[in-house]
Amino acid sequence: MMENILQVSQLSKRFGKKQALSNVEFTVGKGRIVGLIGPNGAGKTTIMKAILGLFSYEDGQIKIDNQPVSETSHQALAKVGALIEYPAIYPYLSGLDHLKLNATGDDVTNRIDRLVKQMKMDSYITRKAKNYSLGMKQKLGIALALINQPELVILDEPMNGLDPQATKDLRDVIIEQAAAGTAFLISSHILSELEKLVSEVVIIDHGEVIKQATIANLNQDQADYIILKTSDDEQAQIILQQAGIAVMKAPGVVFNQTATVTLAVVLKTLIQANIDVFDVLHQGEDLEASLLSILHNETKEG
Ligand SMILES: Nc1ncnc2c1ncn2[C@@H]1O[C@H](COP(=O)(O)OP(=O)(O)OP(=O)(O)O)[C@@H](O)[C@H]1O
């Protein structure tokens, strides 16, 4: 069985009357890259801050490498590196000074050198941070989270403010560190940004975990929409609904093909009702759309 570096169980958090998190549960396996995905205000930053012991919570438990973490119990956080919101940067120190101040353990000089090269920060690392662009500061913040080779790295929207090249460089660094055993929890409100990076996603909305799945499973879950053009679309919709087959309100007759609702079953039903089918269109769904439909269904049920 895979060991978890992070385990969040039944985490609930309120800000005054606002329930920010309800019963949040998920895990991050050692060396895995997990995406925390959800729209603005879903609770991603709140989850990350709770993991980092930055505030109290009403209910639940957080364990890092099987050690409980809370506002008053921080020991396990020695294994964690993080960048939440804006990095704390001293304007009159250089990036290199920041890294030197934060690095602990053996072989510090070499580790700093390597990371600076990997993240392509060489050209400005000795300049004072007050002259850095937003993206440069963001990269420095990420480098600071990575420098002590923690077992778990938590990054809140790390691609924010990075250009496409920097985004790719960051992806490469994360993948390399994960291969060396570091686990990552990375938040984003854009699934496609993380799709090339993460092996698993935790989907969150309105403070609740809607799903934890591997990217492979999410791909599998993608809907297979079929659109029919018939001699009488309105009548066809009524007949299918009467037969217990869900159809969407759209031009044509649209249904989601599943193990039981197959194209063959639908065609048979229509033909028996004397409706002719002129055309059959397959409309797959990309990952982003399938995420949106997961979120949308949840909202309807909730
Ligand atoms: N300190 C606070 N006091 C009161 N409400 C808060 C506080 N921090 C967060 N919230 C509320 O909790 C909810 C979750 O916020 P959070 O910042 O965790 O969302 P998020 O998923 O990180 O969103 P974003 O992508 O916009 O950063 C929001 O409704 C937010 O307004």
Image (spheres, grey):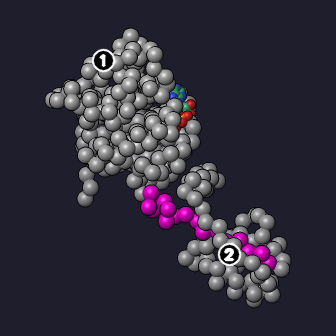
Give the residue displayed 76% in from the left and 64% down from the top.
249
| Neighbours of disc 1 within 10 Å: few (<14), some (14-19), many (20+) | some
Specify the farthest residue to the top.
92
Earlier sequence position, callout 2 versus callout 1: 1
Specify the farthest residue to the left.
106
Q: Nearer the viewer, mark 2 or mark 1?
A: 1
Image coords of residue 121 (percent x, y) = 37, 28
Mark drawn on residue 97: 1
Mark 1 close to ligand 1, CB under 8 Å: no
Give the residue displayed 60% in from the left and 52% down from the top.
292
Residue 178: say if magenta: no
Badge 2 marks a residue whose secondary structure is loop
Residue 87 versus residue 20 in the image, above or below: above
Is residue 170 in sight in this rendering?
yes
Is residue 235 in sight in this rendering?
no
Assign the N terminus to one quadrant of the image: bottom left
Image coords of residue 177 (percent x, y) = 30, 43
Q: Nearer the viewer, residue 39 or 91?
A: 91
Give the residue displayed 41% in from the left and 13% down from the top.
91
The span picked out in magenta is: 215-230
Task: Kindly identify the amino acid type of the residue bearing the numbered disc 1.
Answer: Asp
Residue 56 versus residue 1 in the image, above or below: above
The residue at which mark 2 appears reads as: 244
Task: Kindly identify the amino acid type of the residue bearing the numbered disc 2.
Answer: Gly
Give the residue displayed 25% in from the left and 36% down from the top.
149
What is the distance, in whole Å, between disc 2 and disc 1 at their CAs? Answer: 67 Å
Q: Nearer the viewer, residue 267 or 18?
A: 267
Image coords of residue 260 (percent x, y) = 58, 78
Q: Nearer the viewer, residue 180 or 217?
A: 180
Q: Are marks 2 and 1 in contact (CB under 8 Å)?
A: no
